[in-house]
Amino acid sequence: MLETEDITVIDSKGASVGLGLIVREAALMVKQGKTLQEIVDRVIYMRDRMEHIFAVGNLDMLKEEEEFQQHRRQLELF
């Protein structure tokens, strides 16, 4: 059980090692006695500057994703 029920949910917009760094920073700020708003502002600042880099084994999956997105856009026009 948490000592407080003050929980703020922030969409990280990704899952990676970077997310762990953001959580670590937030935990450090809690230990430093920062306010909830200061922590939220810092987390959002870090999240918005996070870059996601990925690699694929082959280009087949990317081609399938591109085709899927094209069909999705066509359906959205209706």
Image: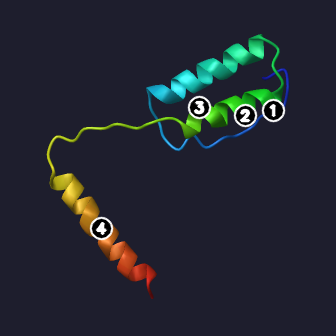
When the figure is inspected, residue 78 is found, relative to residue 21, above or below; the finding is: below
Q: Quadrant of the N terminus?
A: top right
Residue type indicated by callout 3:
Met
Which residue matches tag 2? 41
Task: Report how far apart the C-alphas of labels 1 and 3 lie in the structure.
Answer: 14 Å
The residue mark sitting in front, 3 or 4, is 3
At x 75% / y 37%, what residue is drawn?
8
Left or right: 63, with 6 as reference point: left
Of the numbered discs 4 and 1, the one sitting upstream in the chain is 1
Q: Nearer the viewer, residue 48 or 62?
A: 48
Coordinates of residue 40 in the picture (x, y in percent): 73, 33
Coordinates of residue 31 in the picture (x, y in percent): 76, 11
Residue type indicated by callout 2:
Asp
Q: Nearer the viewer, residue 52 or 19?
A: 52
| Quadrant of the image occupied by residue 57 | top left
Task: Report how far apart the C-alphas of labels 4 and 1 lie in the structure.
Answer: 40 Å
Residue type indicated by callout 1:
Gln
Q: Are marks 1 and 2 in contact (CB under 8 Å)?
A: yes
Within 10 Å of the Cα at label 3, are there few (<14), some (14-19), or many (20+) other Cα atoms? some
Which residue matches tag 4? 68
The residue mark sitting in front, 2 or 4, is 2
Please give the label number shown on residue 46.
3
Task: Report how far apart the C-alphas of labels 2 and 4 lie in the structure.
Answer: 36 Å
Which residue matches tag 1? 37
Residue type indicated by callout 4:
Phe
